[in-house]
Image (cartoon, grey):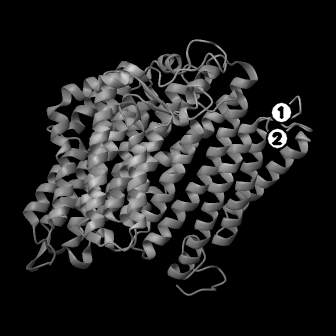
């Protein structure tokens, strides 16, 4: 399970960073979202990956560490708010700058006048 | 009451923000009064805390009475008290300046301003590293909105870069926290420091990786070399009072570096790796920022590059790691923060009276109040360049002495070179603004009273820092010594036992009687 988990986190991070480096705001935002998912999964795993363990303290002899779950919850909330903010900002930048390029330049397609 | 005083720098702006945001219908006048009143109250509270911390005692405050290392603690030592009062003093100047009319160009300026203060104060006070992340996010969210206050193409473009960079930075911050939590199993900084000190082998390597990742994030906030390219554009497009407040934002990164470096990673493998990285990138930041200062063709980017020079200087000093260097750094910190802040405000005043030319370094119409503005500009320029009568020169002298002591003399030529280029650039800017003007009609615009009060409030700090150089340098030396002994913090917060234990580590407010010494 560890290998699969690590692979998922790695692929998500790599895709996130690739998209983050694109020139248009939409792929950048998707990249930020993917990076956020990767980070949340990673945080979740920092308490150690257990199977058949109770979420907090239950009947199980080996409960999982509850702290990473709390951290992930906080990170999800903050990440969600940030994503919403960036989306609105990108829409506004598209309107104000006349282009959805992150530098506000006209794209190679010439799709939007400055 | 005394023991709760330490939570006031967070609660007061939070309450202020709520009142200001919820009373949207009230007049601008009452908003301004409330905002100034809250900020002035904050100055008083932080000065009381400064007085308490100056005695050398550490104050802990367990939120919700959940004891460390399980709950979140607030921690007040000399460093956090210094940062708190610096923030409050700077904020008061900015908010008075903004009351002249900058605040009504968009909505909710004062509420967002208070939220930003809450985030900053929380970050300076917290003793829990995940809580530090949360307060960073509060600060950033408020700063996103403040940056775009008033709108406009330039601001939205710069804001987009700033927001995307910082959201990516937050992701890195979380990864670093995950690595550190995975390796140490705690989030309390003192507890983490205690565990890191006893680590070896694989775990130590993991901690080093996490530490360096953390430093990358803080370098992004502090605007260190490979990560500073967002700063000049962001700061020069922000509204003046906001840009002035942002002068403390880079220092937040510096504070975080100092804090984790002294408390968590002291004497571990990670520390030397961090210091090596900080030293060279600090020096390179000074060099490139000095070139930027010379190349800037507008006063605002020029000041933004001067902020970068100070960041590079401070971080290079932080990487020396000696008590003398930290003393010099802490003496330089208030001076450079307040002077850079006031320069943004003065730039705005100059731009107001030059019509279309704004703050660009071109010939334009004569300024309406050229003697007043020229005097303010001269004082601020002398301060920022680091010429003798003001504190900048003393601080640089202390820094160079500290560098000499640790035999890392690369700081000397770069510091002097940066000073020279700042001198050239400021003299050129001053001559263009005040001497190279067209004859004839005078541009409209007048410095209003709140603007003048705000500027003078910040500028007055420069002579005060010289007059009280003795007590202030004693304070910074005591702070540096306190930072060099993280064991005291660990021992006072967590007790002596080597492992964490629910019963033994109870240490409520570390001592009830100490709250009464105030």
The quarter of the displayed image where residue B110 is located: bottom left
* Number of numbered discs: 2
Residue for point 51% across, 79% down: A97
Asked whether, in this view, residue B222 is left or right of residue B404, the answer is right
Q: Residues within 10 Å of mark 2 (few under 14, many from 20)?
A: few
Q: Is residue B257 above or below residue A31?
A: above
The C terminus of chain B: image quadrant: top left
- SS class, disc 1: loop
Q: Residue furthest front?
A: B1
Residue drawn at (43%, 45%) of the image? B10
Residue B286 in sight in this render: no
Going 23% across and 67% down the picture, which residue do you hit?
A: B100
Decide: marks 2, 1 in contact (CB < 8 A)?
A: yes
Q: Position of residue B428 (x, y in %)?
A: 21, 58
Label for residue B372?
none
Residue B327: x and y in percent read 33, 26
Q: Could you tell me how far apart the alpha carbons at marks 2 and 1 are, in whole angstroms? A: 6 Å
Q: Nearer the viewer, residue A110 or B72?
A: B72
Local secondary structure at mark 2: loop
Q: Position of residue B79 (x, y in %)?
A: 38, 31
Q: Which residue is mark 1?
A: A63
Chain letter, disc 2 residue: A
- Name the spot of residue A14 as percent of width and height, x first: 76, 54
Residue positioned 60% across, 50% down in the render: B170
Residue linked to disc 2: A55
């Amino acid at each position: 399970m560890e290998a699969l988990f690590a692979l998922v986190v790695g692929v998500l991070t790599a895709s996130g960073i690739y998209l983050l480096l694109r020139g248009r705001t939409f792929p950048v935002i998707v990249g930020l979202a993917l990076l956020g998912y990767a980070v949340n999964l990673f945080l979740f795993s920092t308490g150690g990956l257990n199977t058949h363990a109770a979420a907090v303290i239950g009947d199980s002899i080996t409960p999982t560490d509850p702290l990473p779950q709390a951290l992930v919850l906080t990170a999800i909330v903050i990440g969600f708010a940030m994503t919403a903010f960036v989306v609105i900002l990108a829409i506004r930048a598209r309107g104000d700058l006349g282009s959805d390029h992150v530098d506000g330049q006209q794209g190679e397609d010439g799709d939007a006048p400055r | 009451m005394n023991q709760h005083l330490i939570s006031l720098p967070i609660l007061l702006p939070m309450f202020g923000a709520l009142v200001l945001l919820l009373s949207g219908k009230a007049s601008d006048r009452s908003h301004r009064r409330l905002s100034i009143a809250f900020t002035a109250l904050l100055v008083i509270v932080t000065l009381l805390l400064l007085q308490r911390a100056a005695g050398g005692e550490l104050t802990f405050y367990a939120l919700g009475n959940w004891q460390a290392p399980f709950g979140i603690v607030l921690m007040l030592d000399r460093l956090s008290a210094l940062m708190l009062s610096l923030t409050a003093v700077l904020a008061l100047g900015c908010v008075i300046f903004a009351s002249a009319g900058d605040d009504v160009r968009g909505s909710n300026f004062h509420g967002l301003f208070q939220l930003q203060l809450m985030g900053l104060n929380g970050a300076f006070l917290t003793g829990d590293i995940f809580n530090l992340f949360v307060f960073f996010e509060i600060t950033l969210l408020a700063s996103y909105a403040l940056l775009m206050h008033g709108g406009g193409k330039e601001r939205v473009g710069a804001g987009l870069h700033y927001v995307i960079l910082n959201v990516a930075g937050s992701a890195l911050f979380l990864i670093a926290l995950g690595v550190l939590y995975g390796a140490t199993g705690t989030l309390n900084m003192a507890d983490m420091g205690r565990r890191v000190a006893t680590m070896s082998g694989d775990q130590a390597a993991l901690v080093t990786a996490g530490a360096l990742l953390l430093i990358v994030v803080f370098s992004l906030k502090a605007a260190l070399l490979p990560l500073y390219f967002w700063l000049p554009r962001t700061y020069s497009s922000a509204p003046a009072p906001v840009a002035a407040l942002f002068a403390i934002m880079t220092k937040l990164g510096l504070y975080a570096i100092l804090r984790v470096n002294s408390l968590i990673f002291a004497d571990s493998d990670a520390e030397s790796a961090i210091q090596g990285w900080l030293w060279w990138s600090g020096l390179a930041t000074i060099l490139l920022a000095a070139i930027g200062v010379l190349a800037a063709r507008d006063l605002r980017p020029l000041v933004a590059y001067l902020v970068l020079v100070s960041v590079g200087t401070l971080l290079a000093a932080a990487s020396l790691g000696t008590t003398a260097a930290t003393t010099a750094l802490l003496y330089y910190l208030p001076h450079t923060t307040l002077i850079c802040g006031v320069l943004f405000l003065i730039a705005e005043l100059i731009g107001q009276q030059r019509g279309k030319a704004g703050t660009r370094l071109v010939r334009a119409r004569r300024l309406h109040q050229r003697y007043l503005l020229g005097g303010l500009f001269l004082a601020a320029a002398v301060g920022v360049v680091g010429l003798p009568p003001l504190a900048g020169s003393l601080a640089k002298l202390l820094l160079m002495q500290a560098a000499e002591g640790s035999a890392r003399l690369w700081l000397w030529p770069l510091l002097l070179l940066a000073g020279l280029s700042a001198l050239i650039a400021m003299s050129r800017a001053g001559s263009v603004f005040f001497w190279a003007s067209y004859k004839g009609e005078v541009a409209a615009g007048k410095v209003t009273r709140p603007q003048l009060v705000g500027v003078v409030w910040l500028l007055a700090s420069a002579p005060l820092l010289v007059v009280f150089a003795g007590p202030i340098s004693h304070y910074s030396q005591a702070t540096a010594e306190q930072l060099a002994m993280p064991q005291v913090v660990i021992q006072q917060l967590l007790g002596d036992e080597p492992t964490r234990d629910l019963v033994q580590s109870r240490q409520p407010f570390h001592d009830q009687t100490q709250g009464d010494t105030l």
